[in-house]
Image (cartoon, rainbow, N blue to C red):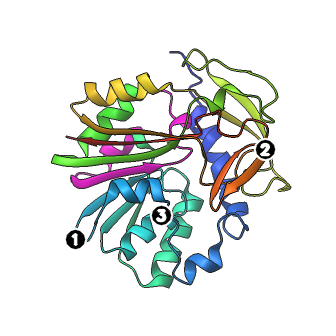
Amino acid sequence: MDFPENYLAINMALWNEKTKHHINSEFYKQDEFLGGKSSLNEAELNLLGDVRGKTILHLQCHFGQDSLSLARMGATVTGVDFSDEAINKARELNKLLGLDARFVCADVYSLPEVLEEQFDIVFTSYGVLGWLPDMKKWAEVVARYLKPGGVFVMAEFHPVIWMFSSDFSAIQYSYFNKETIVETANGTYADRSADLKMTEIGWNHDLAEVIQNLIGAGLRIDCLQEFDYSPYSCFQNMVEVAQGRYQIRGMEGKLPLAYAVKATK
């Protein structure tokens, strides 16, 4: 698929700006996190299991809350993100909390140029795949960083969500990866009133595209789960149907909103 050569620079600028708005937003509950609350959710925790003593590579880690939550659970964690603003903040939080996580500033595709080792677990979650144009290349990076017998765990928003217009009033895009999607971000999911209006570039990735590329990279799919709720109120017109479970108003229980994958190398 053809895509703009400068997509990475455009999205990096966007996420550097988003990070400034996210750090102290109500969405990320930084005070609770600093007080000891984990930022991880039931779906990914169930698949990760006991991570004590495990080495974990966390791809697209943003400013590190999930990485640091894993470190608190006893894992040795390396978090990776292409936003230098996010990585700098993650390092600050790591130092503030007295943890031993490591953070690397790199985009997923160029990570093999700067990081050599392999890990027991590769982890990634929520709102990550849509920023990557090539699932084959992504899956190869995941496999590259897993030790033989290592486990990949991902929790992600369901691709059906990205078919809709932002207010969920109409189907706007294909379920399949047929086009580069260029939009203007007004505000951010963590703060819709934020003074932020920037270009973002993304792609839809249907389930088969994701799963088949993981298989093609040498991983065995052990578990695939779909959920009719999001653990975050990060889309428009959401209603909380149970504690920490959000659905689209008027479509409650009818749409898959998230999915999770566990795979073994």
Tell me where residue 147 appears, x and y as whole percent. Answer: 17, 49
Q: Residue at x 26, y 71 (%)?
A: 52
Report which residue position mark 1 lands on.
53
Which residues fall within the magenta stretch?
A: 109-134
Of the two numbered discs 2 and 3 on the same chain, state the one appearing first in sequence: 3
Q: Residues within 10 Å of mark 1 (few under 14, many from 20)?
A: few
In the rendered structure, which amino acid carries the disc numbered 2? Gln
**Residue closest to the far left:** 148
Rendered view: 193 above or below 261:
below
Q: Is residue 250 left or right of residue 1?
A: right
Please say whether residue 27 is one of the residues in the magenta stretch.
no
Of the two numbered discs 2 and 1 on the same chain, state the one appearing first in sequence: 1
Tell me where residue 77 appears, x and y as whole percent. Answer: 34, 65
Tell me where residue 170 appears, x and y as whole percent. Answer: 79, 23
Q: Are marks 2 and 1 in contact (CB under 8 Å)?
A: no
Please say whether residue 111 is one of the residues in the magenta stretch.
yes
In the rendered structure, which amino acid carries the disc numbered 1? Gly
Tell me where residue 234 appears, x and y as whole percent. Answer: 70, 50
* Circle 1: element type: loop
Report which residue position mark 3 lands on.
66
Q: Is residue 18 left or right of residue 136?
A: right
| Cα separation between marks 2 and 3 | 24 Å
- Quadrant location, the C terminus: top left
Report which residue position mark 2 lands on.
236
In the rendered structure, which amino acid carries the disc numbered 3? Asp
